[in-house]
Amino acid sequence: MRASGRLRAVIAAGAIAALTIGAAGCAESDRDGGGDGGTSAAGGTFIFAGAGDPKNFDPIFNDDGESFRPIRQMYDTLITHKPGTAELVGGLAESWENDPTGKVWTFKLRQGVKFHDGTALDAAAVCANFDRWYNMKGEAAQSQMIYYTDIFGGFAGSPDALYDNCKAQDAGTAVVTMKRYKGAFPGAFTLTAFSIASPEAMKKHGSDTVTQNGDSFSYSAFANEHPTGTGAFTFGGWNKATGEITLNKNPDYWGDKAKVDKMIIKIIKDENTRKQELRAGTVQAIDFPAPADRKALAGEGYKVLDRPAFNILYLGINQKNPKLKDLRVRQAIAYALNRAQLVQTKGPGGSVVADEFLPSTVSGYAPDVQKYEYNVEKAKQLLSEAGATGLTLNFYYPTEVSRPYMPNPQEIFTVLANDLQAAGIKVNGVPRPWNGGFKDDVQQFGKQDLHILGWTGDYNDPGNFVGTFFGRAKAEFGDDAMTEMFDAIGKADATVDQAAKKTAFEQVNRDLAAKWLPAVPIWHAPPALVTTKNVEGLVPSPLTAEEFNTVSLTK
């Protein structure tokens, strides 16, 4: 990586922070047999048990891990992470640099890279992707571009738009210009949502066609049937009847070519069924094992690969409900939750109670935030003072999925709901399927009063956590009047000096806990992967961003 001007020290500081996380990821990989011991056989089929259906395979229209898992194998980003770490390294760009203002980014592209349709990756193709995102038409399509809105602010014609233009300086050099500095870069260029797709394939298969019918969305042939990137695997189809996504080795991949001929992501939504199929040998790897299963599977000889805890589970509070606009009611909810007991009984090994919305390894973490220790009487007192005694709330939680920060949503919901009811809050549980139900109800339509959701960091920056959650008005939290919070996060994120940025985000985190409390942080949990004995080379990522071209199967 190359950096220029006054941002050189900024990026170097970020890299040091990233290596702190990365060291843990590498240690786990080495200890648990992640490397190839020389006994692997070339070829074969690697079968990974996915925990939920992907939404589609167009990177820009996705924001969840189950969708990104197959997408990440088929596409590349301009910048990526060193395997097992959060350290930035070159992806489709061999190198990159910024001007002293941090607004102009120049990418030197790898030569000879081709998309899966045979067309060339060049600067014009890169710019076509940036221009496509910026010029996306239609409220339905724009509403599904969660990452783009969080990072780039808005679309063409919006005063909030961060993107200005992209120019092909020559075939191998793309220059991207922003309207102002944003602290998310260069880390945000690693986001899977910003993977580079073939302009020819997108044009051929109508990539930008997104339609909404009530609460559901439908996508183009490009998104569902013809995803076309530059990645180590090509798309072989999604058989929805069997729940199998097939990915084939790309023999022309520019990087380390896949060691297996084929990878299948087999969607198994039930946690116990995933475990049973692992034991039966019908799948070679599962994600997010239940806390109680980790030791048992390790004892049976399976490889348990721990990732560092770089995530957050939270209880979201929707202030569209007038009662929840009162800070005392939100504080009562926080006091009512016995989070320490939840961590002990339902959290993966190594989980810790979260007092704020980012891990302690991220710059801007404030150890002196207001803490909400379990106190039922305090909760009841605050509800009484707010005139909210007898409050009834609709609590949405997802089904048919496990997430890194949320291994069993039903069990977590049950414990939290019981805590709230013990404090006098009546809870109506509303279970909804993850895609096409829960996420749209919560994040697009704001139907809920309460919900459980979380986040695994994409890169090591405080804005990737608190900015993503609370940097702008969202249906998820239901209040567009918290302008003080939006402004404070925006100013912190726009601070170029890293010491001042750290200080600003520390104050943001104090205020999030004491003044705003748009949600209640629950825990940080280290998610694990489990593989059969014959799987070699799988490198666990602290970002849950594994790429499977390194995987081989022993004889």
Image (cartoon, rainbow, N blue to C red):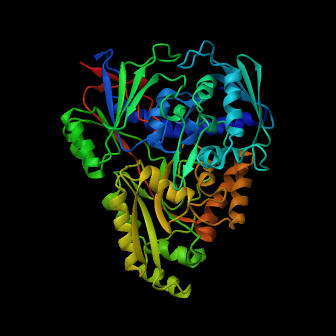
**Residue 303 image offset from top left, x and y in percent:** 28, 35
Query: Residue 337 falls in which quadrant of the image?
Result: bottom left
- Whether residue 529 is visible here, answered yes or no, is yes
**Residue 239 image offset from top left, x and y in percent:** 36, 33
Left or right of residue 332: residue 35: left
Front residue of this view, candidates 235 and 533: 235
**Residue 446 image offset from top left, x and y in percent:** 55, 63
- Whether residue 2 is visible here, answered yes or no, is no
**Up-down relation of residue 369 to residue 235 (above or below):** below
Query: Residue 365 falls in which quadrant of the image?
Result: bottom right
Quadrant (top left/top right/bottom left/bottom right) for the N terminus: top right
Q: At 49% across and 54% down in the image, what residue appears?
A: 439
**Up-down relation of residue 337 to residue 549 (above or below):** below
**Up-down relation of residue 374 to residue 399 (above or below):** below
Q: At 54% across and 22% down in the image, what residue appears?
A: 230
In the displayed orientation, state which residue is furthest to the front. 213
**Residue 263 image offset from top left, x and y in percent:** 36, 26
Quadrant (top left/top right/bottom left/bottom right) for the C terminus: top left
Front residue of this view, candidates 347 and 480: 480
Q: How many numbered marks appear?
A: 0
**Up-down relation of residue 434 to residue 381 (above or below):** above
